[in-house]
Image (cartoon, rainbow, N blue to C red):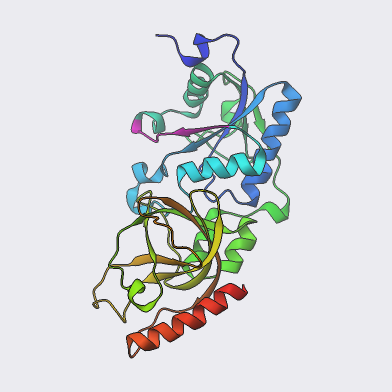
Amino acid sequence: MKTPAEADKNQPRYVATVGMFDGVHRGHVFLLRKLAEVARERGLEPMVFTFAGHPMCQLAPCQAPKTLTTAAQRADMIRQATGINRVEILDPKPELLSLTGNQFLHHIHDTYAVDAFLMGFNNHIGSDRADASALASACMPVIVMPELPAEYKVNSSTIRQALAEGRIEDATDILGHRWHYRGRVVHGRQLGRTIGFPTANIEPLEACQLLPKPGVYAVDVTLPEGRTLRGMANIGHRPTVDCADAPMSFEVNIFDCDADLYGTVLDVAFLGRLRDERPFSSVEALRLQLVADREAARRI
């Protein structure tokens, strides 16, 4: 059977790079825009490879980080931020992760019509963690990016730490954009509706998605049809209305929205942290606090 690259000799040829690109932060965008420049200079098209799940989930599950973005979300964000349309999502199966750096380059050359590869100055690829010097005899030119300017030296781990501590503004600054959580609306207990604050209960699309520190947040919610509305999110155990051992929940009260959202996918952009989650003496006391939270969220 012919590979995709062999099947159509007239298809575009590519220069590519590979990475998790979790969060698509400022450093990622700088690298990917450089990829687009290199593609233009060489008469090739740019292509980005990311992964359906973090490779560490296969290699060392206990050490795998929570992810800032889903695979589809990363692909969307890369296209929007860089104009690169070809984003391939690789399944990090053992047979892929076992490839050495040279074998991986042969694989993308034969399967995806890749004729050049771009990598960061201190990056490694493959099961042998090959750097650029180890790839000097590869089947394609390997282009090494110089060290990034200081303002672009950021990493996803720092962003995860900021979110884990509820420092939304810091995470936004490091990312270069608001952090969005993408999840699906599922049925909940509908307790908020009884006090005038109906909520959309959000479940992750992927098992390893990160949630920020429990608390109440101001958010913007993008609905399936593209409208964005202000809202407030609660992440926690709902101590006033739920039992002490209730599981963690993520629910969003979307202002000025009465649409039936069950089963839909929402993008929730975090704007700022309003307060810690805490128990209240009564449901009425909780309702009054939610009124104040709503006004605070509208002011952000």
Residue 66 occupies which quadrant of the picture?
bottom left
Badge count: 0
* Outermost right residue: 41
Kindly tell me whether residue 158 is visible in this rendering: no
The quadrant the C terminus occupies is bottom right
Q: Is 74 or 150 nearer to us in this picture?
A: 74
Q: Position of residue 109 (x, y in %)?
A: 54, 19
Q: Residue at the spot x=63%, y=39% of the render? A: 120
* Outermost front residue: 258
User: What stretch of residues is rendered in magenta?
Assistant: 86-94
Q: Residue at the spot x=36%, y=42% of the render? A: 59
Please say if 102 is above or below 229. Answer: above
Q: Residue at the spot x=57%, y=27% of the render? A: 135
Please say if 279 is above or below 253. Answer: below
Residue 95 occupies which quadrant of the picture?
top left
Q: Position of residue 27 (x, y in %)?
A: 64, 49
Q: Is 227 or 55 nearer to us in this picture?
A: 227
Q: Answer whether residue 3 is magenta in the image.
A: no
Please say if 276 is above or below 143. Answer: below
The quadrant the N terminus occupies is top left
Kindly tell me whether residue 297 is visible in this rendering: yes
Q: Position of residue 79 (x, y in %)?
A: 60, 39
Q: Is 111 left or right of 118, judged from the image as shown?
A: left
